[in-house]
Amino acid sequence: MKRQKYYSIQREAGKYLFDIRESIASIEQYLGDKRDFDDYQANKLVRRAVERELGIIGEAMSKLLKVDNSIKISSPRRIIDLRNWVIHGYDKVDDVIIWGIIIKDIPTLKAEINEIIGDIP
């Protein structure tokens, strides 16, 4: 019985890790190869899509920590707080802060997720 529970937790954790990786890939797709803040700021559709993906990442991180808090991801609480800010403080979302997260934090998170789950499609 313990073994079955262990594998169930592993599968659940894996699902959340894949959800995070998928949202990161979506953000990269929305932005394309040309990463330009002015283009980002001028495109409401892209901004909203990125904010939604950040919300998904934060929610998946929250659920991931509940099933396996031993997974090595830097700043998981900050990721969850970002989700809460984007979802509940939608009227206070700052494009400059989001852009900084896109440029600095998303590549770090992507590397950490890829380190954990590897190249599994």
Image (cartoon, helix red, strand yellow):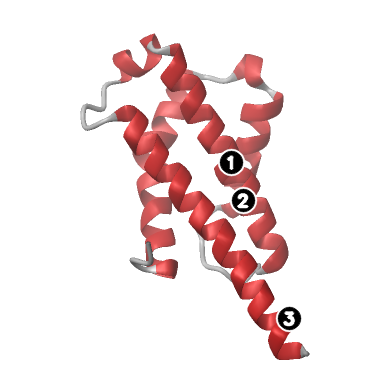
Mark pair 3, 2: CA separation = 20 Å
The CA span between labels 2 and 1 is 6 Å
Q: Position of residue 35 (x, y in %)?
A: 26, 27
Q: How many marks?
A: 3
Q: Bin the neighbour count of mark 2 within 10 Å (Cα to Cα): few under 14, some 14-19, many 20 and up.
A: many
Q: Which mark is residue 7?
A: none
For the N terminus, give its image quadrant. Answer: bottom right
Q: Earlier in the sequence, mark 3 or mark 2?
A: 3
Q: Are marks 2 and 1 in contact (CB under 8 Å)?
A: yes
Which residue is depicted at the point 55% across and 31% down? 52
User: At label 1, which amino acid type do we have?
Assistant: Ile
- What residue is rendered at 71% in x and 26% in y? 88
- Count residues near mark 3 (Cα–Cα under 10 Å), then give few for <14, some for 14-19, many for 20+: few
For mark 1, what is the residue?
Answer: 56
Q: Which residue is mark 2?
A: 60
Say whether residue 74 is visible. Answer: no
Q: Residue at x 45, y 16 (%)?
A: 45
Q: Is residue 96 left or right of residue 33?
A: right
> In this figure, which residue is indicated by the disc labeled 3?
5
- Displayed quadrant of residue 79: top right
Occupied quadrant, residue 41: top left
